């Protein structure tokens, strides 16, 4: 397996399992430490909507039994872990009889589409800008103008999102302020729907890209400065190679490995990193679904979404650790 060893592979799989198990345990207990009863809160919302719910006390007890909340905490934990092992995330407490699996399955494509596009654009632009800022052969005018592109990095993305809505949605009317697609469209792989999705997703993507690419640029700039004086860079220039080849094949390629590690973690966190953006833009993704779960004290929904987040992050880091020796032959996990 190239630079991998079986003992290392075994250790990484054990660490992956422990990470997922510990994360799942934490997200089971943390919501239950918060004050309030989710079933009582659900009945209270029904009372607010209809004015009166007959037999509310009996209803609360019946629903607690239905969701297993009447069991001792340890029994609830074992049932929860058994269900997770079969990827059964249970029923939503606030939206019963909706199943958490189905709710996440409906929302996940929206988040994956939005955050994957935004993260990759930010990663590519940020790394190229950072590398150009550090490279000695970059023209002085370009090096002076590049830092301007990082102006918005210090602004939180949700605040910048509000600014974009104010200017481009309410001020200029160029983009819609909320939603994932226009009304009355047939959902599917047809051009009117795809065009509407792109149209509605432009402002959220801009909010994420413009405020996050500066972090990629600063990291890449530091790595590029470190590698710029290395022997292989000097030798490449001494051979008379084209500056573009030296920049891309020698500078960027050897500086980008730590950035790829950060990218893998970012992609793993993609399901939960969009909560505020999706809330501001009322975007129908997992982040907005998580917000609804927190507001409604929906244990099952919160646990399901955060578990997917933990599983995705741990798996992304595991895959990255196993692929790094293929990206850079200097990396090996064999003992010398």
Image: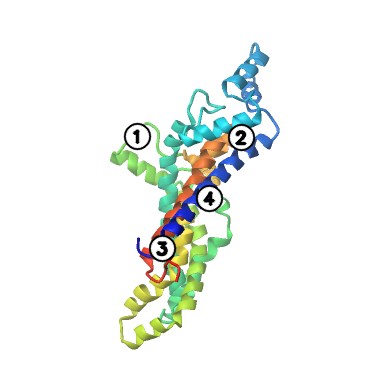
Residue 187 marker: 1
Badge 4 vs badge 1, beta-carbon distance below 8 Å: no
Q: Is label 3 or label 1 in front?
A: 3
Query: In this rendering, is residue 300 above or below 332?
Result: above
SS category of the residue bearing label 3: helix
Q: Tell me the distance, in whole angstroms, between the alpha carbons under discs 3 and 1.
A: 39 Å
The x and y percentages for residue 216 are 49, 64
Residue identifier under label 3: 324
Q: Tell me the distance, in whole angstroms, between the alpha carbons under discs 2 and 1.
A: 28 Å
Residue identifier under label 2: 295
Badge 4 vs badge 2, beta-carbon distance below 8 Å: no
Viewer-proximal residue, 193 or 319?
A: 319
The x and y percentages for residue 97 are 50, 23
Residue 150 marker: none
Residue 161 marker: 4
**77 to the left or right of 133:** right
Looking at marks 3 and 1 on the same chain, the residue that comes earlier in the sequence is marked by 1
Badge 2 vs badge 1, beta-carbon distance below 8 Å: no
């Amino acid at each position: 397996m190239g630079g991998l060893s079986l003992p290392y592979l075994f250790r990484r799989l054990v660490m992956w399992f422990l990470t997922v198990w510990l994360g799942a345990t934490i997200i089971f207990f943390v919501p239950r430490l918060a004050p309030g009863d989710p079933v009582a809160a659900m009945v209270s919302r029904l009372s607010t909507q209809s004015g009166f719910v007959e037999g509310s006390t009996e209803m609360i007890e019946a629903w607690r039994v239905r969701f297993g909340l009447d069991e001792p905490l340890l029994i609830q934990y074992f049932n929860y872990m058994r269900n997770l092992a079969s990827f059964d995330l249970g029923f939503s407490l606030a939206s019963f009889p909706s199943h958490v699996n189905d709710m996440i399955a409906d929302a996940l494509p929206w988040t994956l589409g939005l955050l994957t596009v935004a993260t990759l654009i930010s990663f590519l632009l940020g790394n190229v800008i950072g590398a150009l800022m550090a490279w000695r052969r970059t023209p002085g005018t370009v090096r002076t103008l590049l830092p301007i592109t990082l102006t918005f990095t210090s602004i939180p993305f949700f605040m910048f999102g509000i600014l974009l809505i104010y200017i481009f949605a309410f001020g200029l009317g160029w983009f819609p302020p909320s939603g994932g697609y226009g009304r009355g469209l047939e959902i599917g792989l047809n051009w009117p729907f795809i065009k509407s999705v792109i149209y509605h997703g432009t402002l959220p993507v801009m909010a994420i890209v413009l405020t996050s690419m500066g972090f990629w640029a600063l990291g890449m700039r530091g790595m590029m400065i470190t590698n710029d004086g290395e022997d292989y860079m000097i030798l490449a220039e001494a051979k008379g190679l084209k500056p573009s080849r030296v920049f891309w094949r020698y500078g960027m390629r050897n500086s980008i490995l730590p950035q790829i590690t950060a990218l893998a973690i970012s992609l793993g966190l993609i399901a939960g990193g969009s909560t505020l953006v999706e809330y501001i833009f009322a975007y129908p993704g997992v982040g907005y679904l998580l917000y609804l779960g927190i507001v409604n004290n929906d244990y099952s929904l919160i646990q399901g979404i955060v578990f997917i987040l933990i599983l995705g992050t741990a798996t992304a880091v595991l895959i990255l650790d196993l692929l790094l020796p293929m990206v850079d032959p200097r990396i090996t996990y064999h003992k010398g």
